[in-house]
Image: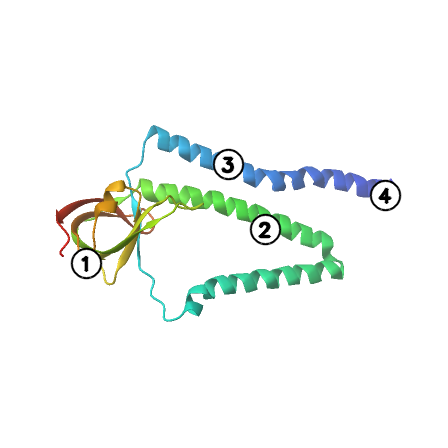
Amino acid sequence: MSPGRASQESGDRRRPAALFLAWGPPLLLACVRAWLQWQDGRHPPTPAFPVAPLPVSDSVAALFLPWLLGAVALLLLAVGLGWWGQRGGARAVQRVLLALWALLWLSGAGALWVSHANTSGLAPLPQEGARVLGLRPRPPTLHQPGGTEVVLALATYAGPQRVRIDDERVTLWQPGQRLRVGLAQGRFYGLYLTGWDRLEPASQ
């Protein structure tokens, strides 16, 4: 068998694997998303709004530092792969890029499942008092629905907490409004607001 024919047969064997790595992970993510949406249609989840500490930073640079570090890391990776490819490792670079591509989509599918499982297994916490510190409307984004971002002071949590609530009744709240809120702990992580009762009008 000639070297050219052997190389062609080897390339023919690698082509299905490359196609599977290129299209398989995105299809898996789409299937996971569709399955989770079907599950939500069968068993509508309890409304749960993530609660997180209000970020406090001394400078604008500190807020953008994680994004800057991520951009630098991507740039260094691109430069390193380009240098490797020019040194004769083009095929190895292709394998690395395919692996990163597959890892990206598989990570997305895993994150979808973990997020769904996290909120479907909430552990209720005792109700506690809260006070509205401020609120503002927030438009929808690719990752979050629209609603009202509320800053709360919770009785047993240090520092202001913020939560985005998709409920028109929240727009009637005013700073100073006192509430009794229901909280729950996620199955794996996070604190969630699951309900509330207005205790008294906002103090003027």
Which is in the foreground here, disc 2 or disc 3? 3
Q: Is residue 140 left or right of residue 51?
A: right
Q: Position of residue 154 (x, y in %)?
A: 20, 56
Of the residues under marks 4 and 1, which one precedes in the sequence?
4
Q: Residue at x 22, y 46 (%)?
A: 172
Q: Amino acid at mark 1?
A: Thr
For disc 1, the neighbor class at 10 Å (few under 14, some 14 to 19, many from 20) is few
Q: Amino acid at mark 4?
A: Gly
Name the mark on residue 4: 4
Do we see residue 48 in this rendering? yes
Per the image, the residue denoted by label 3 is 30
Q: Amino acid at mark 3?
A: Ala
Name the element at disc 4: helix
For marks 4 and 1, give the CA distance.
Answer: 73 Å
Do we see residue 194 in this rendering? no
For marks 3 and 1, give the CA distance.
Answer: 40 Å
Q: Nearer the viewer, residue 9 or 168?
A: 168
Which is in the foreground here, disc 4 or disc 1? 1
For disc 3, the neighbor class at 10 Å (few under 14, some 14 to 19, many from 20) is few
Per the image, the residue denoted by label 2 is 100
Of the residues under marks 2 and 1, which one precedes in the sequence?
2
